[in-house]
Amino acid sequence: MLEFRVLGPVGLWSAAGEAPLGGCKQRTILATLLLADGWIVSDSDLGGVLWERRPPATYQAQIYTYASRLRGHFAGGATITRCGRGYRIEKGDARFDLDDFYRLAKEGQSLTRAGRVGDAAARFRSALDLWSGPTLTGVTDALVDNERSRIEMARMEVLESRIDADLQLGRHHDLVGELTQLVGAHPLRETFRAKLMIALHRSDRQAEAFETFHAGCTLLREQLGVDPGPTLRQAHQSILAGDFEPALPGRGDLVAGSAG
């Protein structure tokens, strides 16, 4: 079975291993068509992501060549079709890691609502395990600029959901190290800082929880000129009140994905 991947290096795998796709332009066409989720991508749009919006006079012929080379790696199970002045990919029974990610994330959401927190945590973890590096590695900067932030935002939301589930399961001791690293990597993301405060509080490390809060307040004021938002304030108030089960930072549904 074919497998398409964009959650890390962009590529195509089959039973024979990874297909030799060559340089970034062929990978860019593959990723662009996959992310279009069955919709037609015009020649002009493909030219824009391939040549930074300055395609050469021969760009359509070059796109045709790249598409033909991709077809040679499919060996059934998926097709690239010429549709008017554009192209469309039909995945057929091929796997696509981004579709799998969104499916697992939605299953995790449903299990959370059903109160099956342990199963939800496992689904979220499986979704996150699909990543093998930065999203859309090996494609043009134009495609990265267009698409990476949207996918990475969904990944961050699933990560937060998995941490929430682990906190509900009493895994706060195990989470302190991970959350400390996440706060270091994303110091202005208040949700990670609030979850770290909760994990520290539940681990009988109240002084460190307060230090985490005050460090966040200082950083927000110095770098953004703002006071902490409700997520951070509520975690702080819960700890001040001696609430050993402070409410977890709430969020809405995950970013909508391509999986049905």
Image (cartoon, helix red, strand yellow):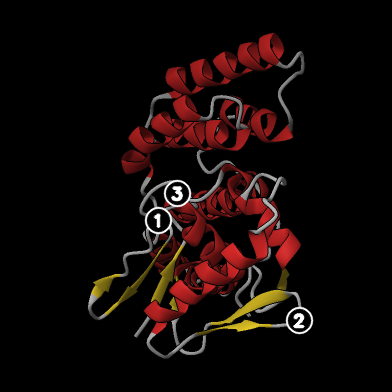
Which residue of the protein is positioned furthest toward the front in this rendering? 57
- Determine whether label 1 and label 2 are within 8 Å by CB: no
At 68% from the left and 36% from the top, the residue drawn is 231
Q: Quadrant of residue 12?
A: bottom left
Amino acid under label 2? Answer: Gly
At 46% from the left and 80% from the top, the residue drawn is 71
First in sequence: mark 1 vs mark 2: 2
Is 139 located above or below residue 219 in the figure?
Answer: below
Q: Is residue 33 left or right of residue 21?
A: right
Q: CA distance from mark 1 to mark 3?
A: 11 Å
Q: Which mark is residue 131?
A: 1
The local secondary structure at tag 1 comes to: loop
Indicate the position of residue 184 as horizontal and vertical percent values: 45, 25
Q: CA distance from mark 1 to mark 2?
A: 35 Å
Instruction: Quadrant for the N terminus, please.
Output: bottom left
Amino acid under label 3? Answer: Thr
Q: Nearer the viewer, mark 2 or mark 3?
A: 2
Residue 253 visible within the image: no
Q: Which mark is residue 84?
A: 2
The residue lying toward the viewer, choosing from 75 and 147, is 75
Q: CA distance from mark 2 to mark 3?
A: 29 Å
First in sequence: mark 1 vs mark 3: 1
Residue 41 visible within the image: yes
- Determine which residue is flagged by label 3: 137
Indicate the position of residue 38 as horizontal and vertical percent values: 65, 79
The local secondary structure at tag 3 comes to: loop
Q: Nearer the viewer, mark 1 or mark 3?
A: 3
Q: Quadrant of residue 216?
A: top right
Instruction: Quadrant for the C terminus, please.
Output: bottom right
